[in-house]
Image (cartoon, grey):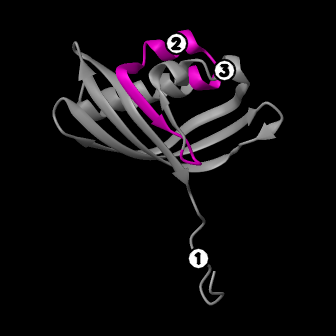
Amino acid sequence: MSTSSDVVELLDRWAAAEQANDAAALETVLAADFAGVGPVGFVLTREQWLIRFGNGLHNDAFAVREPQVRDFGDAAAVIAVLEQQTRFGDQDSSGRFRLSLLVVREADQWRLAGVHIGILQAPPVPGTGN
């Protein structure tokens, strides 16, 4: 299997665990020194990322689309799109976001070491100034 297909398979497992709101499954996906940056800039450690579901986060849908994998040997950088139907308590945080991901090989297994979720704006409409 190529690095690209291994990494995409890892991202599929990550998305499935997120969609299932399954912290135990996430433990098998996240690297020991994982860090995640949310869409409004907060930074979470691995432990904080794993307890989000117990603190009110709920994903109804979570999908990684259009992954572009760049192989660097024992690491890979991925740029993708996240589509989610998510709420935190009563607040809806659904949408489409730009993902930047860092994937590393730990003990011959790929793990997710870093996630940055950013706003994905629609392209400007020609002639409108927007």
Q: Which residue is mark 1?
A: 124
Q: Which residues are magenta?
A: 17-41
Q: Which residue appears at 55% of the width and 19% of the height?
A: 50
Q: Is residue 123 magenta?
A: no
- Asked whether disc 1 touches disc 2, contact meaning CB atoms under 8 Å apart, the reply is no
Q: CA distance from mark 3 to mark 2?
A: 12 Å
Q: Earlier in the sequence, mark 1 or mark 2?
A: 2
Q: Nearer the viewer, residue 126 or 115?
A: 115
Q: Secondary structure at mark 3?
A: helix
Q: Earlier in the sequence, mark 3 or mark 1?
A: 3
Extreme residue in the bottom direction: 127
Q: Earlier in the sequence, mark 3 or mark 2?
A: 2
Q: CA distance from mark 3 to mark 1?
A: 35 Å
Q: Which residue is mark 2?
A: 25
Say which mark, if any, is on residue 3.
none
Which quadrant: the N terminus? top left
Q: Which residue appears at 57% of the width and 14% of the height?
A: 23
Give percent across and percent down for residue 101.
39, 39
Tag 2: amino acid: Ala
Tag 3: amino acid: Phe
Q: Nearer the viewer, residue 124 or 46?
A: 46
Q: Is residue 129 left or right of residue 34?
A: right
Q: Secondary structure at mark 2?
A: helix
Give percent across and percent down for residue 102.
34, 36
Specify the quadrant of the image occupied by residue 129: bottom right
Q: CA distance from mark 1 to mark 2?
A: 39 Å
Give percent across and percent down for residue 90.
84, 35
- Asked whether disc 3 touches disc 2, contact meaning CB atoms under 8 Å apart, the reply is no
Give percent across and percent down for residue 127.
62, 90
Q: Which residue is mark 3?
A: 53
Specify the quadrant of the image occupied by residue 78: top left
